Amino acid sequence: MITTHDFVVIWECATIAVTLAVLWFIVFRAAPERRPLYWAIFLAWLLAGYIWDVNINFVGHVEYSDHWWMMYRVNGKAEPAIAPFIYIFWEVVPALVALHYRELLNRALGRHAIWWILLGFLLWSFYLDFASTSWHPVWAYYQRWPYKLEYPLTAPFVNDFLCTGAFFVFRKLDDLRQRGVQLRFRELAVRSALATNVTCAILLVSIVVLKQLPLLDRIPIPYVKSQY
Amino acid sequence: MSAGQVNVVAPEELVLGRRIKTALVALVLVGIVWVLIAGHFWHHLGRITVLPARAGDRIAVDVSSPAHRAGLADLTAVVRTSDGRTLRIQSDVSVPARGEAHAAFDFAPLLQSDEHVTSFKVKK
């Protein structure tokens, strides 16, 4: 039988493996002219992921389901410091795929390519929230959703907002490069970090504000509480 | 692509594009069916699964849904444990007719120290 500790180890190994795969891609497979942008995206999401996780879980105390919560759920404590590495998988991977195959996708998908790509992001977010975990944890997971509009269609849109909002800035940076604008790595990193953090900030503020609205009564959150 | 630029697309890229679009639309349709089915069974799902719970844990359950509310006094949870036992645990509160409600289930007296809960279902 798989134990809680096994689950945590598998989760950590998978997260590190995905991160290593992304690093390998950037170093060995990415087009050299786009490599600085990819590094910037990688760093920007890592930074924004940490800030977002700390804010959402520990500062804002928004009972928004997250992988940190999942870790807590199986582990009894929100221990793994690598939890925000999951953003490498959630946000960096789709952004890199869409940029790496940008020209091909533009040709293949035609005039409305960007809309198809955004639909892909949305489905990716749904995949992450539904199919990437088994059914049972998913239903428990959504019980923590703080709004009456908790029906499990909400969280994937949150992830999609993060994914899409920052992607538009990454794409714009790629446009600038294609037009011959010389951007240093520091500028790429700053602009990417602004994109991810501003996107997260908009979302965090909207969640915190929505939480206060009487229209959206919070649902009591089930919890396991030790008596000792 | 700037205006007036000729966009040359290879036939295999057109095929790829069509496949991508078909896959995306198919996934949307599957998702809609999935959500409809899940929504239909939503009220059957136990409203709590913070597992594994161990001896000493109390599980608090949101019992605000109409399915739990209708004429309830006390709630019973049917619990399966890692040792294969099936337990019935009475909640410590009754459910009010309206408003949010929590029912708490106390596992402490029932579980062995090395035993944990593997499934948990609130019964009417």
Image (cartoon, rainbow, N blue to C red):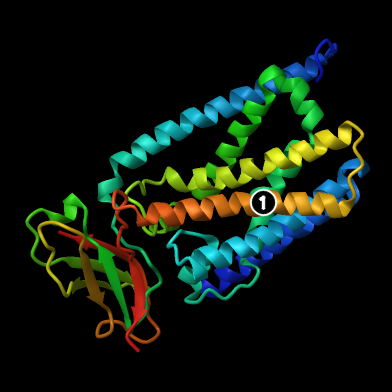
Q: The numbered mark 1 sits on a residue in which chain?
A: A
Closer to the camera in the image, A55 or A123: A55
Residue B7 x, y percent position in the rendering: 83, 14
Q: Which residue reaches farthest bottom?
A: A228
Camera sees residue A138? no
Q: Quadrant of the N terminus of chain B?
A: top right
| Amino acid type indicated by mark 1 | Thr
Q: Quadrant of residue A48?
A: bottom right
Q: Secondary structure at mark 1?
A: helix
Q: Is residue A142 above or below residue B115?
A: above
Quarter of the figure that contains the C terminus of chain B: bottom left
* Residue B100, picture quadrant: bottom left
Circle 1 residues within 10 Å: few <14, some 14–19, many ≥20: many
Residue A208: give x, y in percent of width and height. Answer: 44, 57
Q: Is residue B74 above or below residue B106?
A: above
Question: Is B122 displayed left or right of A8 in the figure?
Answer: left
User: Residue B106: x, y in percent?
Assistant: 25, 78
Q: Residue at x 92, y 34 (%)?
A: A180
- The percent position of residue A57, horizontal first and vertical second, equals 50, 67
Q: From the viewer's perspective, tell me whether residue A183 is left or right of residue B59.
A: right
In depth, the one of B18 and A5 nearer the eye is B18
Answer left or right for A56 relative to A50. left
Residue shown at 47%/48% (left/top)?
A155
So how many labels did they put on this image?
A: 1
Residue drawn at (72%, 18%) of the image: B15
Kindly tell me whether residue B53 is visible in this rendering: yes
Q: Which residue was labeled with disc 1? A: A196
Please determine whether, in this image, residue A9 is positioned above or below residue B123.
Answer: below
